[in-house]
Image (spheres, rainbow, N blue to C red):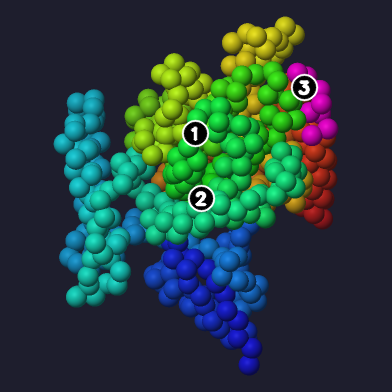
Amino acid sequence: MDTKIIYFTVNGRPEQAEFNVDCPAHDVKELFRVAAEAGPHDILKLYNTKGSIINISPQLEPNTPHACYKLEVVATDCNREPLGGEPAVALGFDLSSMEKRLQSLEKKIFIESGETPSAVYEMKDQMELFREKLESVEHLSWLGLFKELSERKCKPSPFYHKRALRKTSEECERMREKFLQMSSLEVTEEVRQYLKTPTFDNWQWEDTEIMVLLQVMFTDLDFIPTFNIEVEVLQQFLYEVYRRYNNIPFHNFKHCFCVTQMMYGLIWLTDLRTKMESIDLLIMLTSAVCHDLDHTGYNNAYQINARTELALRYNDISPLENHHCAVAFEILEKKESNIFRNLTTDQYKRIREGMIKCILATDMTRHNEILNKFKSILPSFDFGNKDHKDVLMMIMIKVSDISNEARPMDVAEPWLDCLLQEFFNQSDMEKLEGLPVTPFMDRDKVTKPSSQTGFIRFVLFPLFIELANLFPFLEQHIIDPVRKALDYYTEMEKALDKEKQT
Ligand SMILES: [Zn+2]
């Protein structure tokens, strides 16, 4: 009888499932359920290495430990805590109702006094610590031993209620070791050249290799000698960045890499090194690396409607982008990961100002404002004018951020699946919580082609065309592929419409 072994991770923990190829699908699902320690009503989602959801069945494509799948557990009952809830009950605590009480107390105090007193923050910290303690229970038994609670390495995130999204410290440590071992290897000239092109295929590279490639970008733009960056500090910075991107379908570490790689490619294609100062290029590349740090997969509209802590903190003004930027400077505050630590105060000030501008510019609600500004200065664009350069930098990070469709189809299309998956997760949550549902995220209203054709026509093209006006050479690299993508999705849309009619 044939048996299959499938390798996968659950919460960063490697697992393997062995089953007979002709056993019932239900048994295979049960196997995964047990591995995930999931309850009978939980939904399991299995992702392949491209981030697409795959069916848990005896027909699963066999894989290797190096290209393993990822298993995620989604609670069906939104009132049930995905983590911590069960152990808490078993230990005699009702964590979820405690949290609810705390939340309603916080709301009440907020409404009455207009601000959250520090005592509430302290209580939340305590609650978070307690949750961490519960989550670190290895095996739940009456004799259950707690793992040694390590000292909290970073401040609690404002997304305190979404902890399952975070990478575990074990996972991160493993990746760090692998990255450091790998970084001593020489990256070939062929890869270094390929890295400068928009046709680069991110799906071929694992996260540790991606960290090495990011290091190559900083090296090949001569940032290391120019800004006196120590290699160990750069590596620690890149590791911290990796650590603070979450396990979500789209806005993850691979997206960070793609945006940075496109920015890097644009810098080379436009020969920007001869037109702008090195410090500006450093701002652009570092901003791209940091631009979505600690994204949890719910956009600004959700943050504002759900009145999350981020929306409260930033008064509904670009809550996410402000947070990404703040996390970036949190990383840079630490001496061991501050790649700017050997710069003068003036240089640091300039970089901080530039990075804040670039990262905040990625809020799509500011799209027209920034594009119109760029259009108005284009006829007299002057690389010697600081204001002009500032707008160009914002435009370039915006282009890089939404540049997936400028990539070859087989690279771009899986990204669209990831994006829709993240959108659908959000709209599902909005429906559960009774919040307004963003129409372009609604799985009942959106199809793959319909989501893309409008976006390409009304957002991508108008933006990319203006950048190509300044750098005509870019036309073949970013406009032509987007045109092809538009044709592809227009055809797909037509075919879908036809199908509906018949
Ligand atoms: Zn982004």
User: Residue at image x 26%, y 64%?
Assistant: 147
Name the amino acid type tagged 3.
Phe
Examine the rendering and report whether any part of residue 441 can be seen: no
269 with respect to 175 (left or right): right
Q: Quadrant of the N terminus?
A: bottom right
Q: Position of residue 444 (x, y in %)?
A: 60, 49
Cβ atoms at labels 2 and 3 below 8 Å apart: no
Pointer 2 local density, CA inside 10 Å: few below 14, some 14–19, many at least 20 = some
Decide whether residue 471 is among the magenta residues.
yes
In this rendered view, identify the residue nearer to me: 485 or 430: 485
Residue 182: percent from left, percent from top: 56, 55
Q: Dot 2: what SS?
A: loop
Residue numbers of the magenta segment:
469-477
**Residue at mark 2:** 248
Q: Identify the residue position indicated by label 3 in the image.
A: 471
Query: Which of the marked residues, 2 or 3, is nearer the chain's N terminus?
Result: 2
Q: Is residue 440 magenta?
A: no
The picture places residue 304, in percent across and down from the top left corner, at: 42, 32
Marks 2,1: beta carbons within 8 A = no
Q: Residue at x 78, y 41 (%)?
A: 485
User: Which numbered mark, 2 or 3, is in the foreground of this view?
Assistant: 3
Q: Amino acid at mark 2?
A: Ile
123 with respect to 364 (left or right): left
Q: Amino acid at mark 1?
A: Ile
